[in-house]
Image: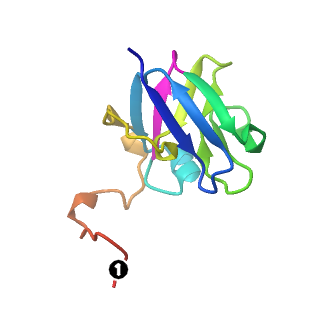
Amino acid sequence: MSSSHHGSCLCGAARFEVSGDFQSFFLCHCSRCRKDSGSAHGANLFSTEARLDWLSGEEKVRTFQLPETRHQRSFCADCGSALPGLQMDGALLVVPAGSLDSPLPMRPNAHINVASRADWDEHLEQIPRLDGLPG
């Protein structure tokens, strides 16, 4: 039995459903994924079998293809939030994990491209954790 996942952008203009299962969940530390996310890594789910259906806002989705590479990123034209996109001529669905609104019943498979990680991305588990904003 395949699963169904719902998600949206930050402003709510683009909403989607993914029908099917994800084969992989990677945290990528390459410089391109760091630029995409503005963070230590990209967190993306991958599927060659799941189907993407736009519930609203498909016309808001833009895709940037980095010239002369296979690297691309889909996002909302209004708020800039990362959104799912089909890559490799439609053979691969890539879904930013943070774009999902429904619970995800899987954990990441691996950190990848760790040799390319940012110099400050080490021993982050030692940094204090706060349940809310700093006081």
Left or right: residue 114 versus residue 131 is right
Which of the two residues, 60 or 36, is positioned nearer the viewer here?
60
Relative image position of residue 11 (x, y in whole percent): 64, 57
Q: The magenta stretch spans which residues?
A: 42-50
Is residue 126 shown above or below 78?
A: below
Q: Position of residue 21 (x, y in %)?
A: 43, 22
Instruction: Provide the residue designation for mark 1.
Output: 134
Q: How many labels does the image show?
A: 1
Q: In this view, does 78 lie to the left or right of 51?
A: right
**Residue 10 place in picture, x, y as percent:** 59, 55
Tag 1 secondary structure: loop
Splitting the image into 4 quarters, where does residue 104 fall?
top left
Kindly identify the residue that appears in the image at 37 percent across and 76 percent down. Answer: 133
User: Residue 71: which quarter of the image?
Assistant: top right
Say above or below: 50 vs 5: above
The reply to whether the magenta stretch includes residue 129 is no
Q: Is residue 48 magenta?
A: yes
The answer to whether 35 is drawn above or below residue 87 in the figure is: below
The kind of residue on which mark 1 rests is Pro
Apparent side of residue 42 relative to residue 1 in the rendered image (left or right): right
**Quadrant where the N terminus is found in the figure:** top left
In front of the other: 21 or 80: 21
| Front residue of this view, candidates 109 and 116 | 109
Quarter of the C terminus within the rendering: bottom left
Q: Which residue lies furthest to the left in this view?
A: 126
Prevailing secondary structure class for the magenta stretch in the rendered image: strand
The residue shown at (25%, 67%) is 127
Where in the figure is residue 60, as x and y percent of width and height? 75, 45
